[in-house]
Image (cartoon, grey):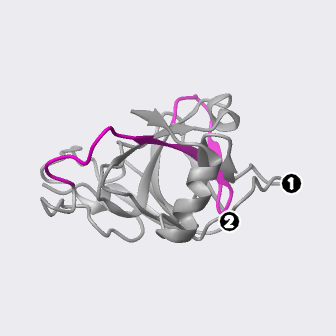
Amino acid sequence: MSVQSDKWIKKMAKEYGMISPFEEIQVRGNKISFGTSSYGYDARVNSEFKIFTNVNSEIVDPKNFKPASFVSKKGPECIIPPNSFALASTVEYFKIPNDVLVICLGKSTYARCGIIVNVTPLEPGWEGHVTLEFSNTTPLPAKIYANEGVAQFIFLKGNEVPEVTYADRKGKYMGQKGVTLPKV
């Protein structure tokens, strides 16, 4: 298994449609950077957020998740309450090749502010917008900026195609668009 370079990422984005929309270079300026890096791709967060709230005193149950546990917000930024979290999705739509596993890590700009990004691996054959979870580990409100970089995706090419891909087993999060809540 090997980590794939910027050259491979660019080729796969153009020829296979692996990332769309795709930024061939790192975009910086007055934004938190996004686009292709040496050995990864820094994705952006969309402008639709679901912020966790305990106003309804619901129990967080992954088998019976209540959408009322979230407040929906659309805009250029999201304020996450202290010791809480928010869900959002990537601007980019990913289409993962059958011999690739993708690991996601948060960007240091957010990590240094106590904001942790969590994403499970993108499995071979999966495609969709990635649902991102932002945990605010601080005792203060924390801000996330829409349409800016939030997480780096690292592409690991396997030594062979697995016997069964995510698409083959018709995974429950296949083709998701926007923020997707837990499913059983």
Q: Is residue 128 left or right of residue 6?
A: left
Q: What amino acid does circle 1 point to? A: Asn
Residue 101 appearing in the image: yes
**Lower position in the chain sequence, tag 1 or tag 2:** 1
Q: Which residue is farthest front?
A: 159
Q: Is residue 168 above or below residue 132?
A: below
Q: Quadrant of the N terminus?
A: top left
> Is 157 one of the magenta-colored residues?
yes
**Coordinates of residue 108 in the picture (x, y in percent):** 66, 32
| Residue at image mark 1 | 30
- The residue positioned 29% from the left and 58% from the top of the image is 125
* Mark 1 neighbour class, 10 Å CA radius: few under 14, some 14 to 19, many 20 or more: few
Residue at x-position 57% and y-position 58%: 45
Label 2 sits on a secondary structure element that is loop
Residue 76 is tagged as: 2
Query: Is residue 44 in sight in this rendering?
Result: no
* SS for callout 1: loop
**From what the image shows, is residue 51 above or below residue 134?**
below
Q: Residues within 10 Å of mark 2 (few under 14, many from 20)?
A: few
Where does the image place residue 33, in percent across and percent down from the top left?
74, 50
- Residue span colored magenta: 136-165
Pick the front one: 126 or 55 = 126
Report x, y in % for residue 111.
62, 31
169 left or right of 115 in image = left
Q: How many marks?
A: 2
How many angstroms separate mark 1 from mark 2 (CA)?
A: 14 Å
Residue 89 within the segment the image draws in magenta: no
